[in-house]
Image (tube, rainbow, N blue to C red):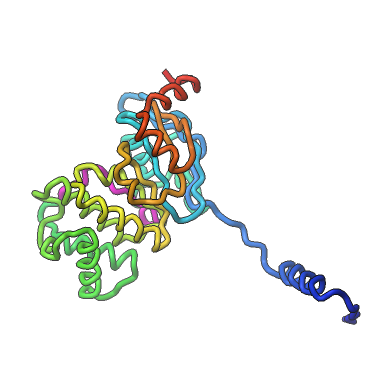
Amino acid sequence: MILVLIVVDEEVFINMCLHYLASLAPQVRCVDLLELYDVKVSVKETGRRIVHGVTARLTKPGIYIVMGPNGAGKSSLANAVMGHEAYRVEGRILLDGQDITGLSTAERALRGLTLASQNPEEIEGVRVSEVFARIIKRFRGVESTAEALGLARELLETLGLPASMLNREYMVGMSGGERKKLELARVLAQKPKVALLDEPDSGVDVESLRLVANAVGRLVDEGSIVVLITHQPRLLHYLEPSEVYVMYNGRVVAVGGYELVERIENEGYGWAAQLARSAGAP
């Protein structure tokens, strides 16, 4: 190959070099981490439709807020995305560019999706230490049980829970606030790609809200997309949302930033009801 050198302006020469080097770089396609395409959710037992065609693309780690009054379909959508058997889903759900619509809850969890539910189940006869050790070993690649339990203690302390909780049966006999915080600690232990948090602020006292917010921030710092469902703005005072979705009667009626949180705080959901009606909702 023959190189022909031509004297040009220095800035032009540098730009030519940068364009040439960029042309040599491999083309990388950015994959949206979580994508919903026209997702409709119905209750299998009754056939009643709860969610009417939600489309969303969450492209990078951050906090994505889903707000709406009780009965808006927020929790049903989260459970359907997680693969709950009580719901029938139409549309497509993609994780890392792969269609997971037909996968079981367990398969979705192994791919990096998790849900912190409003009412986590009690597991009698199984200690918190056993649950956390298994999760940390499986999802964080920790081999030593002692190391796994050390991390478990740290995660409990992050949420203001005592290390002695490791000796208790999982969720058995715990208060609502303890259950919420333990469920969030479990999500932290899993280090998911996408964490669906269903009203992590309900049943939590005001003093604990900052601890919950810090845990959500830690998830994002570790690379997670956090979908946080709530109908009260109080927790959001401690967070910086990447995007806010407002649901009403099973539809997303508005997408924006923190200004939507402020509008809900000041005006309630009346304006969202009007948008839903204009979209054809009853």
| Snapshot quadrant of residue 3 | bottom right
Q: Is residue 169 magenta?
A: no
Can residue 92 be seen by looking at this rendering? no
> In the rendered view, does 126 fall on the left or right side of 158?
left
Residue 248 pos. (x, y %): 40, 28
Residue 278, compared with residue 14, is above or below; it is above
Is the residue 43 above or below the residue 201 in the image? Answer: above
The single residue placed furthest to the front in the displayed view is: 266
Q: Nearer the viewer, residue 14 or 226?
A: 14
In percent of width and height, residue 221 lies at: 40, 62
Residue 18 lies in what quarter of the image? bottom right
Point 90% across, 78% down: residue: 6
At a point 45% along the width and 56% down the height, the residue shown is 61
Query: What's the magenta region?
Result: 108-122
Residue 274 visible in rendering: yes
Q: Is residue 267 above or below residue 188?
A: above
Residue at the (14%, 65%) spot, across then down: 163
Which quadrant, please, contains the N terminus?
bottom right
226 is higher (above) or lower (below) than 69? below
Task: Tell me the quadrant of the picture where the C terminus can be found.
Answer: top left
**Residue 192 location, quadrant:** bottom left
75 or 247, which lies in front?
247
**In-front residue for pair 105/9:** 9
Q: Is residue 12 left or right of residue 179?
A: right
- Image point 12% across, 60% down: which residue? 165
Residue that protrudes farthest toward the top in the picture: 282
Q: Position of residue 278 (x, y in %)?
A: 49, 20
Q: Position of residue 233 (x, y in %)?
A: 32, 40
